[in-house]
Image (cartoon, rainbow, N blue to C red):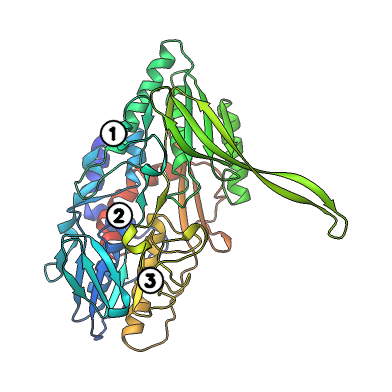
Amino acid sequence: MNRRQALKTIGLSPVAATMLLGTSSAITPAFASSDAKGKIVIVGGGTGGIIALARLHRALSNPDITIIAPNETHIYQPGQVFMAAGLYDYSDITRDNKDFIPDDVEWIKDEVSEFDPDNNRVITRAGQEVKYDYLVVATGIEYKYEHIKGLSIDDIGKNGISSVYLNNPEEGTTEGGSLTWDWFNYIKDDAKAGKKPRVICTQPGTHIKCGGAPQKILYLSNDNLRRDGLTADFTFATAKGKLFGLPEIEASLKEVQKGYGNITNKFGHDLKEIDVKNKIATFSHKYSIKGEYDEDLEEYDMIEKEAIVKLEYDYIHIVPPMGAHEPLAKSKLSWSKGNSKGELEVDRETLQHRRYKNVFGIGDICAVPFGKTGGSARHHGPIMVGNLISQMEGKELTEKFDGYTVCPLKTEYGKIILAEFNYHGLAPTFPIDPAVPRYTWWVFDLYALVPMYWHLMLRGLM
C-alpha cells in the first residue's frame, strides 16, 4: 500500500480512529447527561462550532440546539499545509457538514449580521431573528487580504503570489493549498533553469490561525528545493520580534535555519502594500533605538521608530492580517483592547463572557492569550460545555482552560517540532524533548490526525 492509499484508508476508517483514541493525548470523556433546559444557539460551523454541538448534544438529555452556519462543506484547515506540500488533495480535507449535524438540531444556513446580547437574540443576514437562552460563539476569525494595499484576492495564484490560507468554506473551496503547491513548483522550475529566485514569506502583526504556519511554508518550500539539490534566497519577513515565543523552540528553529543556510529574517516587518506588477513588497518596520541614559533608573530610554522598507521579490507567500468578523467586532460582545480587539471577550479560563454570563466562546474567536489552533478548540470543548451546563444548572463554573496550544512546526519533509504549550510555558504530552524535530510527529500529523479529526474530535469523543 503506497502513501496515498494508506492515507485514504486511515482517513476514512472510524475503526482506525478508534484505535488511535487509545494513544492520543488529553482525551476527555463526555459529561454525564444533564436534564438542564434552555434554548442554545451556536454561531459558526467550523471546528469550534461542530465540537461544541457534538458535546452539548451528548451532554443534555433533551437538547434544544440551533446552529447558524452557512457552510455546507467542512474544511480540515490544517490540512492545507500538507496540500501545499503536495501530500494531500481536496478530498482529504473536506467533508459534508451535514454528516456532523444531528437531525434534531435546527440548522440555519446563514450568517449572523447582528449580535444583540441585551435582548438575547441574533439577527441573520436574511433578517431572521433568532432568540436564545444561551449563546455559543464559534465564528472563528476571518482573513483580511484587503488590508494589504494593492492586493486583490484575484492576484493570489498569479505573478508569483500565493497564500496557503485562501479558502471559502461557504462555497467549499480550498484554493490555498493547491495554489501553494503550484507555487512550490514554479520556484523549483526557476531554480532548475539556473536562476536563484528571491522568495519572501510573510507573517502579519495580528493574531492568525496557527501562528507557526508561515514558517511551515518557509521550510517546506525550501526543502522542496533542497531535496533536488536546488536553492533560492529566502526572506522571512515577520511583524514579530522573534521566531517563536518560547526560548527552547526558538533555539531549535534557529538551528533549523542554520541548516538551510539561505534564510534571512526580517523581524518587525509587517506587510502593508504590494506592487503586483513590479513585484515589490512594502513593509512597515518598527524598531527601537537607545535614547538618553536615565541615571536614576540606570538604563537607557528606548525610542520607538518606524521605517518603510521596500523589498523586491520573484515569489511571495502572503499570510493576511486576520481578525473577528465585523458583526461581532461591532457588537457589545467584543473585546476592546490590544491585539485581541474585536474578538469575543471571555474569561481566559472558563471561556464564559465576562459581562454576559449566558454567552460562551470556543475556538479562534476567543480573546485569550493563546489558542488559535484546532488543538486548542479540542481542549476548549469539554471546558466550555462543562461550564455552560453548570451555568444552566445554576452551579459554580469549575472547568478551567489552561491555555493549551499545539503547533506542529514542519521544519522539512519528514520532520516536525511538536510545540505544545499553555499559559505557563511548555506543556509536552509525552516525556521527550519537544524542541527536537522528529519523524514520529511527521507520521502522526500526516496520517493520524485526519481520522482523529473526522471521527473523534468532530464527534466530541476527544
Mark 3 closeness class: few <14, some 14–19, many ≥20 residues within 10 Å: some
- Residue ID at (31%, 84%): 392
User: Which of these two is toward me, 160 or 404?
Assistant: 160
Hey, which residue is sitting farthest right in the picture? 295
Report the residue marked by disc 3: 332
The amino acid on which the numbered mark 1 sits, given as a three-letter code, is Asp
Report the residue marked by disc 1: 154
Mark 1 closeness class: few <14, some 14–19, many ≥20 residues within 10 Å: few
Classify the position of the N terminus by image quarter. Answer: top left
C-alpha separation, residue under disc 3 versus residue under disc 2: 33 Å
Residue 432 badge? none
Marks 1 and 2: which is nearer the front? Answer: 1
Evaluate whether residue 62 shows in this view.
yes
Which numbered disc flags the more N-terminal residue, 3 or 1?
1
Which numbered disc flags the more N-terminal residue, 3 or 2?
3
Q: Do the residues labelled 1 and 2 touch (CB within 8 Å)?
A: no
C-alpha separation, residue under disc 3 versus residue under disc 1: 34 Å
Residue 453 badge? 2
- Where does residue 34 sit, x and y in percent of width and height? 26, 83
The amino acid on which the numbered mark 2 sits, given as a three-letter code, is Tyr
Left or right position of 233 against 384: right
* Element marked by disc 3: loop
